Amino acid sequence: MRRRLTLLVAAVGVLVMVAFLVPLAVLVRTVAADRATARATADVQLLVTVVGTATPETVRLTVDQLAVDTGREVSVFLADGTVLGAPAPRTPAVTLAARGRSLTVESAAGREVVVAVQGRPEGTGVIRTLVPRAELTAGVTRAWLVLALLGALLVLVGLVVADRLAGTLVRPITALSAVSHRLANAELDARVEPAGPAELREVAGALNHLAERIQILLREEREQVADLSHRLRTPLTALRLEAESLRDPDDAARLTAAADGLERAVTGVIQRARWRSGTAATGGGCDAATVVGERVTFWSVLAEDTGRTVTLDLAPGPLPVRLSGDELAAAVDALLGNVFAHTPDGTPFTVRLAAEPDRVALTVADAGPGLPPGPVRRGASRAGSTGLGLDIAERAARASGGGLELSAADGGGARVVLRLGAAPSA
């Protein structure tokens, strides 16, 4: 923008200079030619009295002296055909002046000035002088050069002023752009200092107000989520007490573990809701083999109850990933929970964890009816659920530097591949 404004001012400045200097240059040349013609006419007028009254010899001497003083050709044509002074042909202008009319005529050699002189016995005499082209344009080139330098100087001054003015406009706009990018990157404490014209200062104030409103709204949303999650602790405590009171130790241990896992998930929600930044965070790393193995073992109990066959294929660990254990456990639970929620009892599924270059791939495949047609969006489900399971897994994958892929399994069911960014081995 700064460059465009400078070029615009330069173009306008050049056009103004051309519109001003071209007529001025033509005027300078015209004035110079008229001045030279006026001097020649004044010199010729000095001879009128001598030519009208003196003898031819006196006229000759006077004409020769004037030619030496002025450096121009001066000729006197008498009515009897005698030519005194510089020899010159009788031009049409001289012929016309012999009829009693003085005039100035342009010629190839310059400007011809002829003056008719009355009073001689033999008839009308004519005084002729030629103003050469060099005298007509004397000083014009220098004047044009001065005008050109003056125009260039004025354009340069205009460019400097335009650059400074453009800077006062561009710098506030650049600051606004930088702060908007910082806000987009969740730096909600970023503020812009109002500067520049009144319109830009108003925009800066509006951007600062928007950032403050975003902070307030996010803070209120985080507090509401934290409060809602905190309310779940009471029924969780009651659930744990009920689990501990069961007579069967295995059932008691299983339900207690489930309650503990749910409480950890609720605690994670509270902690994330109270983060100052709204960006995703990985919270460190974990061993994917250990976490996936633990979660599959947990879900295997439910799989046995529902008649499902679980095939677990874990690559030799450790497989460190750039994701916290709680985040990975939540993603695995979301994927396995979808299998139980969207496939009939007795449907087998496979969990495979393998190492890839800079990635760790977790594949969950089942032999169910497969994925319903259409895109998967957060909060929108075509199977009667909340629509958040796959989104939770995808967010975890992206937080670690990976991604989520959906496809059809070989047996006609669904295959979900969760690629996690591998962490450097300790």
Image: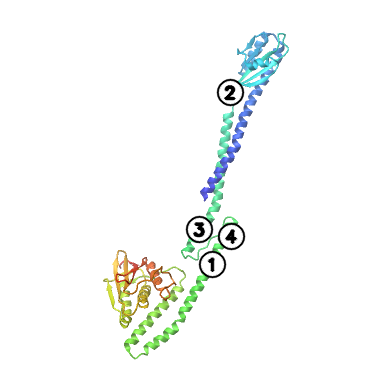
- Residue at image point 53% right, 45% down: 7
Residue that label 2 marks = 133
**Disc 4 from disc 1: Cα separation:** 15 Å
Q: Residues within 10 Å of mark 1 (few under 14, many from 20)?
A: some
Horizontal arrangement in the rendering, residue 148 relative to residue 39 (left or right): left
**Disc 2 from disc 4: Cα separation:** 65 Å
Residue 212 numbered mark, or none: 1
Task: Tell me, yes or no, whether the two marked residues, 3 and 2, touch with CB atoms within 8 Å.
Answer: no
Between disc 4 and disc 1, whose residue precedes?
A: 4
**Disc 1 from disc 2: Cα separation:** 78 Å
Residue 329 numbered mark, or none: none
The amino acid at mark 4 is Glu
Where residue 236 appears, x then y in whole percent?
Answer: 42, 83
Horizontal arrangement in the rendering, residue 171 relative to residue 69 (left or right): left
Between disc 1 and disc 2, whose residue precedes?
A: 2
Disc 3 element? helix
The amino acid at mark 1 is Glu
Residue that label 4 marks = 202
Residue that label 3 marks = 177
> Toward which corner of the image does residue 208 lie, by quadrant?
bottom right
